[in-house]
Image (tube, grey):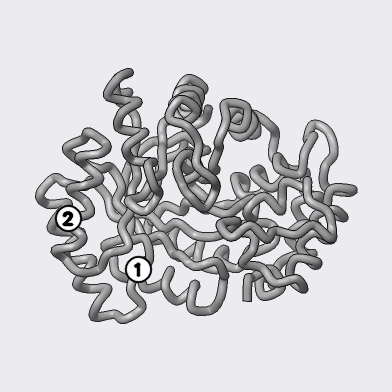
Amino acid sequence: MRRRVLGKTGFEVSEISLGAGQIASAGHGRISEENAFSVLRSFVEQGGNFIDTARGYGNSERYIGEYFRKNGYPADLIIASKTWETDPADIRRELEESLRLLGRDCIDLYYMHEPPIDPAELEVVLGTYEQLRQEGKIRAIGSSIKGADVTPQTIGLCRNAIQSGRVDVLMVIYSIFRQGTAEIFGEASDANVGIVARTVLEDGFLAGKYVPGDSFERPDDPRGRWGNESLAIILQCAQEMKLWAVVPPYETLTQVAVRFALDREGVSNVVLGARTEEQTRQCIETTALPPLSPEIRERLEDEFRGRDPEFNTE
């Protein structure tokens, strides 16, 4: 798998990172330790070297730590983790627990899982992260711009992180349906801040396997966040898109959606979750496909640019 430099971190990371929330997150349904290990093994064997986890992802950090303790950490493996905490003592406590579970002395990239909106609070958190970096506990600082929606506030949080001068990597929603965060990609590039794109498949809606009328009523199903009106728009658009966007050598809408994000100037990496070896293989194989044709890309941008509110959860 090809690699890209992740902003000013200097890390050379695989184009696809493994979103390890799906191997142990209640929101995606739990899987066995054996299955989790098979996903991690498949990812590394196929050239992946960037794994994204978090303190809030159930058993994810524990599975990662146990797998690599048994099989050895590859020298070039990059691990990212996160915490929602904003109090300095709580941040340290969470980080120490992540280090213990992962079996590492240092975490390569440590994200604010949800950066504070208040500038004074953000300054305190970033100061704590800087101190942790100086102590050798972390190597780089990230800001995961959380929330299920892309709004003007999302863009503002991105700018706060970039302008702080302390953030090395931003993780943001970026997909065919929601292209709004591309507004700050140029600013991030100018500041040499890496961009990790998440939610590129929109919780599976851009896999193209759901049809209008499908419902998502399981309590822990993240797709239940969308109301019926939004769901109708999302599912109809995805089905229509399959008819004209999936053309050889592309075989699935998933491939189109992943390539759309990978091809966007300014994007350093695309994070994708996987629960099986087959899903892992499918994610990675997309990187071998050629860029989308200019005609398809232009149509995807023209049809969906500026429509983020239609595809948000609220």
Question: Does residue 102 appear to the left or right of 44 in the view shown?
Answer: left
Q: Earlier in the sequence, mark 2 or mark 1?
A: 2
Q: Does residue 11 lie above or below 46 as drawn?
A: below
Q: Nearer the viewer, residue 53 or 181?
A: 53
Evaluate whether residue 48 shows in this view.
no
Looking at the image, residue 24 sits to the left or right of residue 236; the answer is left
Label 2: element kind:
helix
Kindly indicate whether the residue at mark 1 contacts the one at mark 2 (C-beta within 8 angstroms).
Answer: no
Q: Is residue 64 above or below residue 117?
A: above
In space, the residues marked 2 and 1 are separated at their CA atoms by 18 Å
Residue bearing the label numbered 2: 93
Vertical placement of residue 35 versus 178, above or below: above
Q: Position of residue 138 (x, y in %)?
A: 21, 47
Q: Answer left or right for 6 relative to 181.
A: left
Q: Quadrant of the C terminus?
A: bottom right
Residue 101 visible, this orientation: yes
Could you say where residue 311 lies in the image, as x and y percent from the top left?
A: 69, 68
The part of the image, by quadrant, that contains residue 132 is bottom left
- In this view, the residue in front, 120 or 54, is 54
Mark 1 burial class by Cα count in 10 Å: few <14, some 14-19, many 20+: many
Nearer to us of marks 2 and 1 is 2
Which three-letter amino acid code belongs to the residue tagged 2? Arg
- Residue drawn at (39%, 36%), measured in percent from left and top? 12
Q: Residue at x 30, y 19 (%)?
A: 70
Q: Name the residue rendered at 36%, 73% in the picture.
A: 160
- Name the mark on residue 115: 1
69 sits left or right of 201 in the view = left
Q: Name which quarter of the figure residue 120 lies in.
A: bottom left
Helix, strand or loop status at disc 1: loop
